[in-house]
Image (spheres, rainbow, N blue to C red):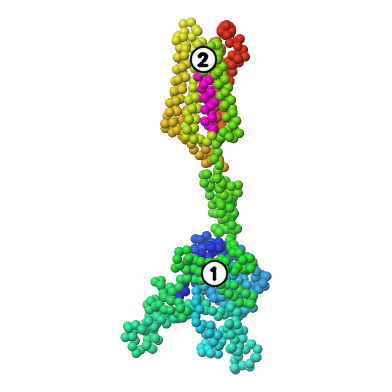
């Protein structure tokens, strides 16, 4: 007749989760029903992340004659309850179990000051009617204020109030229940005619039930009474159907009184399951296919008053048959909490919630509801309270300082507007202008001996290559685009190969020229533009082939590096094939090494203005820069990596320009008297005689 406990258990779980009560206590009657309730509820609580802080068994009756028993009961029941930090307690049992538990509390600590610590959120199951004994009428039950109860729904019946008002104890025919109830409720007694009469404390029988406080007797029909009322009428309707059937009329014709006396309960069941009727409250009642008549439960808030009266306020409902999303309804604003909670839903947790920026860390040997709050690891955040684990921000975000949120990363690249970019642009432009000036000087004085020495055309090619080297560094500035990514490494590799191969050609020219001056030397046929031009073209074509393969297989492309820096997204040119990048760079290093060795060996050869010693210095600078470039390039990220590459381009090119051309420019511009053939021949002869 009443909803099954499965529906009630679901309602309890939903209520606890609604208020986030995950650390709760449980009082259960010490019998089979209490054991079954605990066996069913505890796994449900665990599955939903709720722990039982305390489990107490409550006896139905107290043995008042055994002092040791009462002492143990007090120690095992009241003291753990008093020390428990949970603010929410579930109470399962009947009204007698509730009476027993309150007796234990008040006999242990009857003072109101101590009772203040007992004011918790009580969750009562539907088995309990809040009705206490007359012995407890003088006690303060304010700690039940704010109790949340699951109750069986009931409806008002016409005439029920009149029925209660008309009840008189002396009208009873039977076992004397009314007289005993009357004496306990009104704290009086009915005199025994065979004993002397006492004037005080005699029950008149005219006392009115509505004068009793609600904790002793409720004038409205409770859910339990409503279920019993419906059960009686359901049985009556089932028996009526049974005796109205044709089969039973034929079988029992003339013998109804006899059959009534031998009727067995199982004979009523088939008829009971199929009945449907309207009760006097106008509610349509019938059993479903599971043999249940009711599935819904009301959620009621108990509001107590100083005069021992109370009011039940309906604050919600549990109905598994309701439409989706309405199976559990509760109105928080209607709930009256204990005074100590200041009308705010209390917390009932083992550990205070972990703040954002922290996560739960399990305590060894404790239940999972008890935990420590640990800081999120570096690079992770928690944006909500009580997160089980910290999470990483998206690749385009980074954690805040408190690790409680994510901030969008800024896009970083070496721009023309920032100080470092402006400095590099200024240096590159100045060096390009100096190279242009040097080229202009050499073109203007192209017929002078010092310009004609060591192949004038190769000198022009070298100066043009250095000019393009300085200007190519500008391709590395600004936000990477498809065109700039495609051109920057290609231009850098080809132009530097031309520059280094030109220096190599100049060095080999010195060696060949010296060897050709020896009598009978076969090297004379190699002296001229053919050798130097072939060296420059062949060396440059090899690098061009490397670049073509690189660009054809895996060319550079614009990319975003979200991992290297915490707060920035690096806009960069992905090299595509790192192997091809280092092959191209290694080839330039190979040419530089050959040039350095050749220049070093030829540094003391007698020739008209021997450049080998200057080339040696320039290649030492060049090789030192690019040997330092590799570790510096690999150890930096973002715009600084680009700056390292630009710096290496500028410094190595400037080393070639200054070491090779500054001595010549000095003579051409400041010491023109030395730029004469007679002077150079005299210097050459002196060098030969010294050697």
Specify the segment rendered in magenta: 461-477
Residues 511 and 103: in front is: 511
Residue 467, magenta (yes or no): yes
> Quadrant of the rendered structure where residue 311 is?
bottom right
Residues 53 and 71: in front is: 53
Dot 1: element: strand
Instruction: Kindly tell me whether residue 124 is visible in this rendering.
Output: no
Residue 298, magenta (yes or no): no
As displayed, is residue 329 above or below residue 223? above
Q: Residues within 10 Å of mark 1 (few under 14, many from 20)?
A: some
Dot 2: element: helix
- Identify the residue at horizontal 44%, vertical 25% (top origin): 544
- Residue 526 appears at what percent x and percent y? 45, 12
Residue 315, label in figure: 1
- Residue 552 appears at what percent x and percent y? 42, 31
As displayed, is residue 618 above or below residue 289? above
Instruction: Kindly tell me whether residue 448 is visible in this rendering.
Output: yes
The reply to whether dot 1 and dot 2 touch (C-beta < 8 Å) is: no
Sequence-first disc among 1 and 2: 1
- Identify the residue at horizontal 62%, vertical 84% (top origin): 187
Residue 456, label in figure: 2
- Identify the residue at horizontal 53%, vertical 85% (top origin): 162
Main SS class of the magenta portion in the image: helix
Front: mark 1 or 2: 2
Give the number of callouts.
2
Query: Label 1 to label 2, Cα distance in Å?
Result: 102 Å
- Residue 55 appears at what percent x and percent y? 56, 66
């Amino acid at each position: 007749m009443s909803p099954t406990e499965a529906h009630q258990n679901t309602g309890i779980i939903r209520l606890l989760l609604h208020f986030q009560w995950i650390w709760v206590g449980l009082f259960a009657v010490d019998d089979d029903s209490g054991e079954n309730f605990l066996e069913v509820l505890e796994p449900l609580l665990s599955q939903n992340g709720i722990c039982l802080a305390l489990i107490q068994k409550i006896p139905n009756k107290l043995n008042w004659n055994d002092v040791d028993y009462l002492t143990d009961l007090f120690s095992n029941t009241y003291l753990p309850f008093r020390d428990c930090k949970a603010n929410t307690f579930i109470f399962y049992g009947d009204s007698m179990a509730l009476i027993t538990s309150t007796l234990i509390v008040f006999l242990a600590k009857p003072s109101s000051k101590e009772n203040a610590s007992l004011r918790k959120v009580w969750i009562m199951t539907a088995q309990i009617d809040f009705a206490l004994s007359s012995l407890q009428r003088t006690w303060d039950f304010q700690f039940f204020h704010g109790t949340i109860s699951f109750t069986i729904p009931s409806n008002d019946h016409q005439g029920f109030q009149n029925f209660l008002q008309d009840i008189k104890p002396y009208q009873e025919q039977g076992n004397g229940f009314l007289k005993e109830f009357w004496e306990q409720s009104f704290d009086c007694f009915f005199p025994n005619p065979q004993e002397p009469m006492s004037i005080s404390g005699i029950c008149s029988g005219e006392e009115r039930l509505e004068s009793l406080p609600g904790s002793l007797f409720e004038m409205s029909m409770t859910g339990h009474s409503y279920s019993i009322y419906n059960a009686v009428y359901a049985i009556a309707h089932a028996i009526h159907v049974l005796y109205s059937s044709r089969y039973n009329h034929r079988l029992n014709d003339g013998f109804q009184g006899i059959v009534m006396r031998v009727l067995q309960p199982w004979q009523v069941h088939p008829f009971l399951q199929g009945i449907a009727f309207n009760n006097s409250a106008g509610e349509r009642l019938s059993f479903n296919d599971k043999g249940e008549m009711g599935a819904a439960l009301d959620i009621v808030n108990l509001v107590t008053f100083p005069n021992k009266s109370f009011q039940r306020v309906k604050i919600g409902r549990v109905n598994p048959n309701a439409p989706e999303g309405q199976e559990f309804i509760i109105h928080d604003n209607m709930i009256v909490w204990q005074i100590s909670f200041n009308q705010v839903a209390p917390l009932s947790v083992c550990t205070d919630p972990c703040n954002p920026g922290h996560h739960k860390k399990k305590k060894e040997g404790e239940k999972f509801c008890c935990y420590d709050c640990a800081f999120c690891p570096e690079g992770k955040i928690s944006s909500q309270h009580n997160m089980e684990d910290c999470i990483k921000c998206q690749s385009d975000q980074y954690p805040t300082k408190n690790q409680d949120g994510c901030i969008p990363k800024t896009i970083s690249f070496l721009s023309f507007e920032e100080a470092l970019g402006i400095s590099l642009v200024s240096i590159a432009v100045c060096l390009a202008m100096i190279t242009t000036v040097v080229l202009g000087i050499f073109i203007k004085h192209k017929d002078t001996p010092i310009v004609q020495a060591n192949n004038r055309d190769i000198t022009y090619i070298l100066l043009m290559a250095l000019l393009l080297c300085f200007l190519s560094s500008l391709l590395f500035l600004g936000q990477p685009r498809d065109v700039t990514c495609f051109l920057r490494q290609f231009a850098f590799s080809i132009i530097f190969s031309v520059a280094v191969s030109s220096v190599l050609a100049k060095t080999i020219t010195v060696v060949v020229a010296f060897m050709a001056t020896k009598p009978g030397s076969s090297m004379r046929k190699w002296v001229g533009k053919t050798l130097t031009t072939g060296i420059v073209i062949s060396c440059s074509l090899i690098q061009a082939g490397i670049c073509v393969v690189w660009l054809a297989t895996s060319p550079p492309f614009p990319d975003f590096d979200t991992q290297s820096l915490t707060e920035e997204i690096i806009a960069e040119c992905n090299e595509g094939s790192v192997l091809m990048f280092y092959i191209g760079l290694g080839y330039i290093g190979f040419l530089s090494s050959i040039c350095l060795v050749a220049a070093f060996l030829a540094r003391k050869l007698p020739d008209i203005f021997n450049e080998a010693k200057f080339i040696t210095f320039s290649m030492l600078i060049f090789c030192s820069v690019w040997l330092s470039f590799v570790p510096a390039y690999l150890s930096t990220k973002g715009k600084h990596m680009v700056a390292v590459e630009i710096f290496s381009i500028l410094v190595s090119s400037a080393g070639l320009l200054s070491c090779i051309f500054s001595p010549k420019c000095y003579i051409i511009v400041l010491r023109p008297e030395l730029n004469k053939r007679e002077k150079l021949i005299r210097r050459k002869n002196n060098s030969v005689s010294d050697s």
